[in-house]
């Protein structure tokens, strides 16, 4: 297998944490988004969508979405499951990862990409160029604040998003909460359940990679 | 189990098709988005996110995301699998459903919600109100056209998005392609692989529900 990573971006960090938590070692190649290497002919031949992470599997599949990489690795290497072991657990984990993507990750990305001068003309990932929309940056900021509240409510009485076990859902939410620093947002300290959860995950070795 | 549906909206249609393709019969309640019933106190007590579909399971879980409903039902009722039976199949199906959501469903929704006068002040689903952003409607239109090309390239030499079998990925992509009529977009007829795929799925009984 080959894992295409980028040390500075949140989406590949999700796959990197997942691989580490599974205890797997996979040959890794860095793609520098700062150098626009994801738009190079060499990388577009691997992933025409021009995004990382990418996992090329032993079967020869090219997986370009975090949910696909997680699904593949958890099914192929069932030790240390991160996607649950019962229908109920599996569903809750997929649900909370999707909520964290849509209500946490998407707004952070909208704010960053539509306000950062370095991303002018690159307001969306992918091979096509889109102009920035300043109102979208403002809307993203409002939504990230709502997301912190959503997290805190779910974490009342729970160590992790779906219960007693650390899972893929926690990876997704943690990575986007951590990345929100780039738009100067962090969990308000009065949200103690979410603040404690964040500290709990930050302390895991996989979070320091 | 109880399935909260809305006959006019694309997201619950995905779950409705999934349930039908699994051959399941689940007690169903209609939530009228036209009447803003999703924002009623009674429904907010079920799903504070104010979205459909929702599946309340026999274990008592409230599942509010399509990926969670599909994951639960396919794990609990393994006959007629729609999420694959090998790590490679499972990953490809999750990948293509995620691509269809992000590159097809999201742009259609952005265009509709940011241009339709009836959705003024309701540019996003959920309990919070957001104003329309006209540039986002234009951007969505451009992205939907790109998505039709993505679909057509993937369907070269394949009957369904991930190979020989109809899956959850086809449901996701079909529902959003079909819903694009609301922003007056359809697969260009010169994209014959995508056009044929669309006709193939449209002919399934589950597409008529």
Image (cartoon, coloured by chain):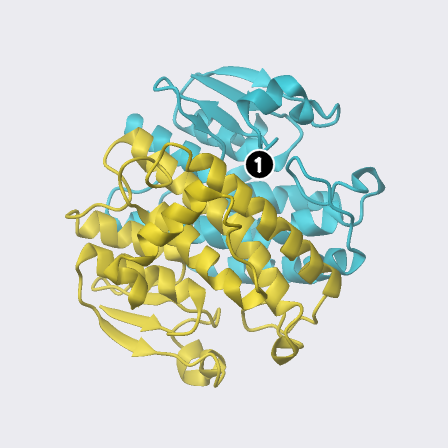
Chain colours: A yellow, B cyan
Q: Quadrant of the N terminus of chain A?
A: bottom left
Q: Quadrant of the C terminus of chain A?
A: bottom left
Between A134 and B174, the residue placed more toward the observer is A134
Does residue A43 sit above or below A182 in this rendering?
Answer: below
Q: Secondary structure at mark 1?
A: helix
Between A207 and A78, the residue placed more toward the observer is A207
Determine if residue B168 is in view.
Answer: no
Which residue extends farthest right?
B117
Residue at 48 percent of width and 72 percent of height: A50
Between A71 and A144, the residue placed more toward the observer is A144
Name the quadrant containing residue A131: bottom right
Determine if residue B104 is in view.
Answer: yes
How far across and how far down the image is residue A167, in percent?
Answer: 30, 46
Which residue extends farthest top?
B27
As drawn, is A136 to the left or to the right of A146? Answer: right
Task: Tell me which chain the residue with mark 1 is part of.
Answer: B
Does residue B6 sit above or below A42 in this rendering?
Answer: above
Residue at 45 percent of width and 31 percent of height: B18
Name the residue carrying label 1.
Answer: B11
Crowd around label 1: few <14 · some 14–19 · many ≥20 (10 Å): many
């Amino acid at each position: 297998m080959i894992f295409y990573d980028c040390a500075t971006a949140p989406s590949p960090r999700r796959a990197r944490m997942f691989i580490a938590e599974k205890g797997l070692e996979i040959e890794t190649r860095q793609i520098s988004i700062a150098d626009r290497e994801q738009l190079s002919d060499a990388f577009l031949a691997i992933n025409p969508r021009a995004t990382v992470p990418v996992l090329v599997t032993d079967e020869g599949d090219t997986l370009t979405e975090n949910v696909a990489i997680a699904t593949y690795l958890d099914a192929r290497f069932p030790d240390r499951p991160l996607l649950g072991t019962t229908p109920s657990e599996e569903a809750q984990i997929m649900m909370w990862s999707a909520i964290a993507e849509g209500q946490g990750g998407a707004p952070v990305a909208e704010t960053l990409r539509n306000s950062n001068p370095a991303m002018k003309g690159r307001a969306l990932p992918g091979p096509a160029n889109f102009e920035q929309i300043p109102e979208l940056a403002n809307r993203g900021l409002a939504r990230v604040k709502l997301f912190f509240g959503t997290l805190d409510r779910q974490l009342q009485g729970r160590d992790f998003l779906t219960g007693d076990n650390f899972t893929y859902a926690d990876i997704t939410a943690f990575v986007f909460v951590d990345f929100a620093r780039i738009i100067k947002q962090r969990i308000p300290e009065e949200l103690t359940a979410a603040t404690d959860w964040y500290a709990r995950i930050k302390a895991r070795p996989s979070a320091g990679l």
